[in-house]
Image (cartoon, grey):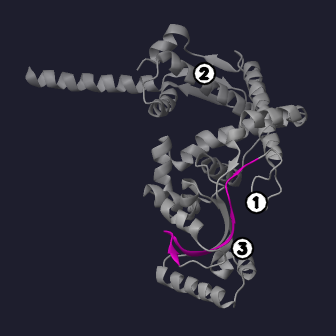
Amino acid sequence: MKKLAIGTFIVLAGLFAATAQASLYQQLAVVKITDTEVVTVKEVKDIVDTQEKEAGRKLTPQERAQTFETIINQKLILQAAKKAGVTVSASELDEAFLANISQQLNLPRVYSEKELNDLVMANKKMNFSDFVKDQTGMSVDEVKSQIIRPDLIWRRYLLSQNQQELQKISATDKEIRDYYELNKTQFIRPDSLKMFLVAVPKDSDPLAARVKLEGLLKDVKSGKKTIEQMRRDGQNPKEAGYGAGDLYLMKVQQHAAQLGVTYDELLKIFDGDLNKPSEIMDAGQVWQFYIVLEKYPFKALEISDVVRPESTQTIYETIRALVTQTKQLSFLEQKRQETIKSLNTPENVNRKKTGDDLIKLLSW
């Protein structure tokens, strides 16, 4: 009897596992405009798991139902975009991903994947792929395919459908000035400086890289090479063997990290003399030295001031671009909702589960 009981338990356990597996792949809806796409419990659960990790709590079945609707809406608008011939190339996807990450990290420009890897390694002691996984719960490829690509496609689709109306949207003079008055305390420029930075990547031979940089530093000190010569040659690092260019830094922690130094080291840079080459510095993946060319004191910026010394873009123009973009994004979101509403019809969406039946399936 014991053998029979154990055998029965194993069979029942297998049945329960098979039933649970089958319920994960149960169809909740079928979306069909250009393709036939099925929304399963598993697809909803995978996205909910990520949302719950970000939120730090369990989502209610009603909140999970909202995620289910979002999945349907995304499939609808992506299929509509496909029908309209909207595509995104691999290079465009890579560029958008790097731009998104650089923006999330508040970097002053779009960093390459290598630069991001170096930055994360210096500050978080992990490689870039692990950093993305830690922050999102997804791999780099998953972020690109599941977040960046759909976002690019729906925006491009809506832009193609509403281009003329969108071009008419712009910030008014009153909106620009009102924005400045409401946010005046944010328009400041901390103590800042302009430096000329020269860096040689260590690659597989750190010693040879240091010797290379020592030679460049010697040439600068002796006058054999001018800053202008190195600035020009450094724009083609593969040929020159080094990178060089101007860099604007503010006396803030973020810019210390950007340079690959501690905040205390950044303060020493600001205290240094003008036009005097620094010693060689170890910045992780590169050896580097710098020359401080100009220093600029703290300044509260008026609306007519330029954003940065030697720049031609004023605060007024910056706000105009920001307010215009905000209005255009609001317009696009309104059009997105209108488009989804027009697409979300019984002809395009066959809902297999609704009401209490849906909530029951989402109550895992």
How far separated are the C-alphas under marks 3 and 2? 49 Å
Give amino acid for label 1. Answer: Pro
- Which residue is label 1 attached to? 309
Locate residue 127 relative to residue 188 in the image: left or right: left
Q: Which residues are magenta?
A: 280-301
Rendered view: 283 above or below 89:
below
Residue 287 lies in magenta, yes or no? yes
How far separated are the C-alphas under marks 3 and 1? 22 Å
Number of the label disc, if any, that sits on residue 69: 2
Q: Residue at x 18, y 25 (%)?
A: 7
Q: Residue at x 37, y 24 (%)?
A: 20
Q: Residue at x 51, y 74 (%)?
A: 281
Regarding mark 1 in the picture, which secondary structure is present there?
A: loop
Quick one: which residue is furthest to the top in this view?
356
Give amino acid for label 2. Answer: Glu
Locate residue 258 relative to residue 158 in the image: left or right: left
Number of the label disc, if any, that sits on residue 235: 3
Closer to us: mark 3 or mark 1? 1
Regarding mark 3 in the picture, which secondary structure is present there?
A: loop
Residue 15 lies in magenta, yes or no? no
